[in-house]
């Protein structure tokens, strides 16, 4: 060890601030030592507990760790999430690798470790939670916060520091394959739930990562990594608000740039976005990491850089701090730009300061830092065979939490009274997802994302199917199971068997939907975009045949996006929508069908009436509605916010609790009473929508600005009061500034965006007011039971 690693080194002085410690370390580093902290290396943990090995594929240039490590290493990319590895042996492999990394560089700096965690820790044998679109359906931030904390705790216990989640993209076109990764089509819903998830993750010591900043979901025709054409107002008022809320309120410490270009400027090279808005205006002080290979894409896809060196310089100058997943542009290409005088070393120091501050805050540069993760603290690290199977990442508590989220996310879209089922004698369970263990998992779950590449390895977690769960739930019923067709195949050979099973049953449960995958290997997921929102394969034809039998058909959709379901809207006995509800999805569906769970999920995205009327969301102006001058009606079959219950609710007594005219910097107050008029307990979701009848620019007809989950026993009432600051009525004016305009505003209290039950009008008075990023983002909500 050299003098720089002694106890007297100022960067190890915990009495100094992290910023002071980082600066002192930067002063002692060579250029190569500095740049080494600004990239990751994609690795896979050893299945025997040995050191990690670099992951190689066609997009990863070969990496020689022996050559790299003497200068240090910024990050390790997905050691747990690259191939199946026992959690304990993976933790041991990571521990040994961290010791090697810290021991190889003269400052003793270990790597920061990141993993995917979009729907749970994406590693073998870890809990597979519902996907973010299902979080959106819960409208329950507290529950999502609890899940984030549980995921973070598991990741941190085995040595992970950063999670690449959540996704804050706003759905603009449901044909996009990554809809399942989003929280929905409304910016306020996304912002509140994403912020809660981040707070949970960060509370467990995991650095959360906002993605994809910004505009990725607004691609033309819903194609992945396609051109984006949005105006500055749509960007400011629709795409950016979830990110702004998260930066202001969540404590998030990392942001991932999007692959997109906005008006010809790729976000990876957009200093106005990554430095001007994110840091200088919003005050973000964490790291900006590259989406995988995104810096090289400046040369290879966007054509704004002629060399990888130019790409590296453009990204670093714009504000990208870390290249992921592996060293490509930020290695020798970046060094060459600096040595040639084309990029000042101050740009490296700026990024390096942010990276080192995070490592210091994580304790990675403290005296006495240990590479041993908490899950292995009491283990015999010399006996790898005894370690295997000693760490459980799918605990009973995790499964219970996953079950609760699944149950609260399931949406009862329609019901002619058949649900809950009253113990029918014969149930025909039909469809390609009826007995399919993969039907509940999104594309970033480990079994779907990685497991398919290892068909000989067990899935690693229990995944009870809908058919299995129905057998357990309806033990007195005779249950037949018939696939009828595959998820996306063209064969109808199984139709006759399915129809025969339906004809012999008292009720048909048709379980249809998606198969998650990547880049065309599924019907939903990254790179699995669709031309129209018709059910994949021949599933619609199968559904039509089942309905034609005359038997009551309960349609259960296990999907990653909304689909049009044709005549089933009118002719199915009931429609139950579940967006990839995770490992406990099968039992959750069965409990909803039996009535043991009273459904309380609400649609985070509209279900279309027609498969080809895209792009279309509820957040639309008057011109986006049906009209006499177009033959295309984009109206939804079931709108954003819709969802039924097995009980009934009455809404009444709306009052404006204060003056009906308020200044443009004031607040309005309104309240209403909700009563459970049914015979069983249930949860109503009171949604507050804002309508601005006359504005200086075109506004959406309505938009969500608040909501409240209200659980009521039979006969019980509650008073729901909203305090509505004028700030939530702000929008981007003609001159590009955010303003609050005087005039009338309509507050709509609804059970969905298409079912506004009560309305109140308030007037904003005074002059037009300019607001900024310090404006109020939320309505106050208070639920008082028994009134």
Image: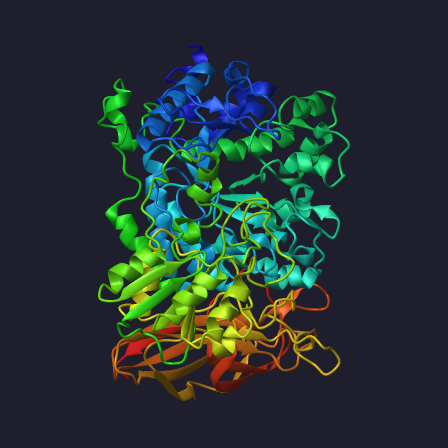
78 relative to 785, above or below? above
Q: Please name whichever residue, 508 or 172, is drawn nearer the observer in this view of the structure.
A: 508
How was the colour assigned to the protein in this rendering? rainbow
- State the quadrant of the C terminus: bottom left
712 relative to 501, above or below? below
- State the quadrant of the N terminus: top left
575 relative to 490, above or below? below
User: 294 left or right of 82?
Assistant: right
User: 658 left or right of 39?
Assistant: left
Total number of numbered labels? 0
Residue occupying the point 62% across, 35% down: 293
Residue 688 screen position, x and y as percent:
47, 76
Is residue 320 among what the camera can see?
yes
User: 77 left or right of 551?
Assistant: right
Q: Please name whichever residue, 648 or 452, is drawn nearer the observer in this view of the structure.
A: 452
Residue 6 found in image quarter: top left
Residue occupying the point 55% across, 82% down: 746
Residue 139 screen position, x and y as percent:
41, 65
Residue 400 screen position, x and y as percent:
27, 54
Residue 266 found in image quarter: top right
Residue 589 screen position, x and y as percent:
35, 63
Residue occupying the point 56% across, 39% down: 289
User: 290 left or right of 181?
Assistant: right
Residue occupying the point 30% across, 69% down: 426
Is residue 316 among what the camera can see?
no
């Amino acid at each position: 060890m050299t003098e720089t690693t002694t106890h007297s080194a100022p960067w190890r002085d915990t009495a100094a601030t992290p910023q002071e410690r980082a600066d002192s370390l930067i002063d002692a580093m060579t250029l190569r030592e500095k740049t080494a902290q600004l990239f990751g290396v994609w690795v896979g943990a050893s299945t025997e507990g040995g050191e990690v090995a670099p992951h190689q594929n066609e997009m990863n240039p070969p990496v020689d760790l022996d050559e790299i490590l003497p200068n240090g290493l910024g990050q390790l990319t997905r050691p747990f999430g690259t191939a199946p590895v026992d959690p304990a042996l993976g933790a041991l492999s990571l521990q040994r690798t961290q010791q090697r990394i810290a021991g190889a560089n003269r400052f003793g700096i270990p790597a920061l470790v990141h993993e995917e965690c979009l729907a749970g820790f994406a590693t073998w044998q870890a809990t597979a939670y519902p996907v973010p679109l299902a979080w959106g359906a819960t409208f329950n931030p507290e529950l999502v916060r609890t899940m984030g904390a549980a995921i973070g705790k598991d990741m941190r216990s085995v040595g992970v520091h950063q999670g690449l989640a959540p996704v804050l993209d706003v759905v603009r076109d449901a044909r996009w394959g990554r809809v399942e990764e989003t929280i929905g089509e409304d910016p306020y819903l996304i912002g509140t739930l994403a912020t809660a998830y981040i707070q949970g993750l960060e509370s467990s010591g995991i650095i959360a990562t906002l993605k994809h900043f910004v505009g990725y979901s607004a691609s033309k025709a819903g194609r992945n990594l396609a051109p984006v054409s949005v105006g500055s107002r749509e960007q400011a008022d629709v795409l950016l608000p979830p990110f702004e809320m998260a930066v202001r309120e969540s404590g998030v410490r990392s942001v991932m740039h999007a692959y997109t270009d906005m008006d010809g400027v790729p976000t990876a090279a957009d200093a106005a976005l990554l430095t001007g808005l994110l840091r200088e205006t919003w005050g973000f002080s964490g790291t900006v990491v590259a989406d995988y290979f995104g810096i090289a894409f400046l040369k290879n896809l966007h054509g704004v850089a002629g060399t990888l060196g130019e790409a590296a310089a453009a990204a670093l100058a714009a504000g990208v701090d870390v290249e992921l997943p592996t060293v490509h542009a930020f290695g020798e290409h970046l060094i060459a730009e600096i040595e040639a005088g084309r990029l000042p070393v101050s740009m490296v120091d700026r990024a390096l300061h942010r990276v080192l501050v995070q490592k210091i805050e994580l304790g990675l540069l403290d005296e006495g830092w240990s590479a041993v993760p908490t899950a292995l603290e009491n283990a015999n690290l010399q006996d790898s065979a005894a370690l295997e199977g000693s760490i459980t990442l799918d605990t009973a508590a995790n499964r219970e939490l996953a079950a609760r989220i699944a149950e609260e996310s399931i949406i009862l879209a329609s019901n002619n009274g058949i649900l809950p089922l009253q113990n029918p004698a014969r149930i025909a369970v039909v469809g390609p997802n009826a007995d399919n263990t993969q039907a509940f998992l999104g594309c970033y779950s480990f079994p779907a994302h990685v497991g398919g590449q290892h068909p000989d390895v067990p899935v690693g977690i229990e995944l009870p199917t809908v058919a299995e769960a129905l057998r357990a739930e309806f033990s007195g019923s005779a249950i037949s199971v018939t696939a009828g067709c595959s998820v996306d195949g063209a064969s109808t050979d199984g139709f006759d068997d399915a129809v025969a099973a339906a004809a012999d049953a008292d009720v048909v449960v048709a379980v249809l939907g998606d198969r998650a995958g990547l880049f065309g290997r599924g019907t939903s997921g990254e790179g699995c975009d669709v031309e129209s929102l018709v059910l994949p394969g021949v599933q619609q034809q199968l559904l039509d045949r089942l309905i034609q039998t005359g038997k009551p058909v309960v349609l259960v959709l296990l999907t990653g996006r909304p689909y049009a379901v044709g005549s089933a809207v009118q002719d199915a006995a009931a429609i139950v929508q579940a967006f990839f509800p995770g490992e406990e999805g099968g039992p959750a569906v069965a409990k909803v069908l039996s009535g043991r769970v009273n459904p309380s999920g609400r649609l985070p995205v509209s279900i279309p009436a027609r498969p080809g009327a895209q792009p279309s969301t509820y957040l639309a102006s008057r011109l986006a509605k049906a009209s006499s001058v177009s033959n295309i009606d984009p109206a939804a079959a079931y709108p954003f916010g819709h969802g039924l219950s097995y009980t009934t609710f009455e809404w009444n007594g709306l009052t404006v609790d204060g003056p009906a005219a308020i200044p443009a910097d004031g607040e309005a107050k309104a309240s209403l009473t909700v009563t459970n008029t049914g015979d069983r307990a249930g949860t109503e979701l009171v949604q507050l929508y804002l309508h601005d009848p006359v504005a200086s620019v075109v506004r959406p007809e309505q938009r969500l600005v608040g909501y409240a989950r209200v659980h009521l026993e039979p006969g019980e009432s509650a008073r729901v009061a909203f305090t509505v600051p004028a700030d939530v009525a702000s929008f981007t004016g003609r001159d590009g500034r955010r303003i609050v305009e005087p005039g009338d505003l309509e507050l709509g209290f609804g059970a969905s965006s298409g079912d506004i039950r009560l309305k109140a009008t308030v007037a904003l008075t005074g002059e037009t007011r300019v607001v900024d990023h310090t404006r109020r983002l939320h309505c106050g909500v208070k639920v008082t039971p028994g009134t």
